[in-house]
Amino acid sequence: MEVIRRAFAGFRFEGSVSVGLIDDRHILIRPRLKVDFLRLWSRQLWFVVKATMRIFKWTPEFSMQIESPMAPMWVSFPDLPSFLFVKASIFLIVAGLGPPLKLDKVTETLSQPSRARVLAKIDISKPLVDHIRINLPGERSFCQVVEYEQFLS
């Protein structure tokens, strides 16, 4: 366990991260800062002491025998109209697919206004939609393409 703790200390988190053993296959990782949690969870796979470690978000329903179907996934909206390039709008759009977690830096800074990219919690046991309808005021709407990045990185 001490080797795993030292490995986590080397990951340079912004805040403190406690690591504890649950059983021989599971450890509990508790980051103090949300930014560290998002970094851990959005990456999904970590390599620690020559082993691959998969990250799951703990919930009250957590079972060590059942893998959660919920996974963080980067979702992109190519050619999203520029007036929708606002965090609240993008979060509202992606909420139909799953709870939004964060915008990527490029989207936040509008340095690539041809594509909005957001990290969301997606149920990967369900089919992924490739288009969504966005309704605008005045009974206007349009069909928006949705693209997903591979959830295991």
Image (tube, rainbow, N blue to C red):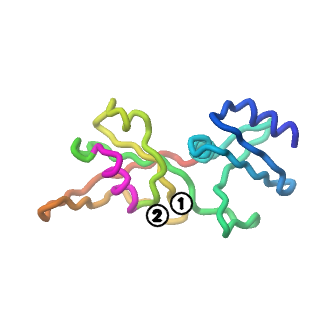
Q: Residue at x 38, y 53 (%)?
A: 91
Classify mark 1: helix, strand or loop.
loop
How far apart, in angstroms, are the residues tagged by discs 2 and 1? Answer: 7 Å
- The answer to whether residue 81 is visible is yes
Residue 53 sits in quarter: top right
Residue type at numbered disc 2: Pro
The residue wearing badge 1 is 124
Q: Position of residue 16 (x, y in %)?
A: 70, 39
Q: Residue at x 78, y 51 (%)?
A: 27
Q: Residue at x 19, y 59 (%)?
A: 136
Badge 2: how crowded within 10 Å, few (<14), some, or many (20+)? few
Most common SS among magenta residues:
helix
Which range is magenta?
85-96
Residue type at numbered disc 1: Ile
Residue 127 — which label? 2
Q: Observer-nearest residue: 30 or 107?
A: 30
Q: Position of residue 97 (x, y in %)?
A: 42, 60
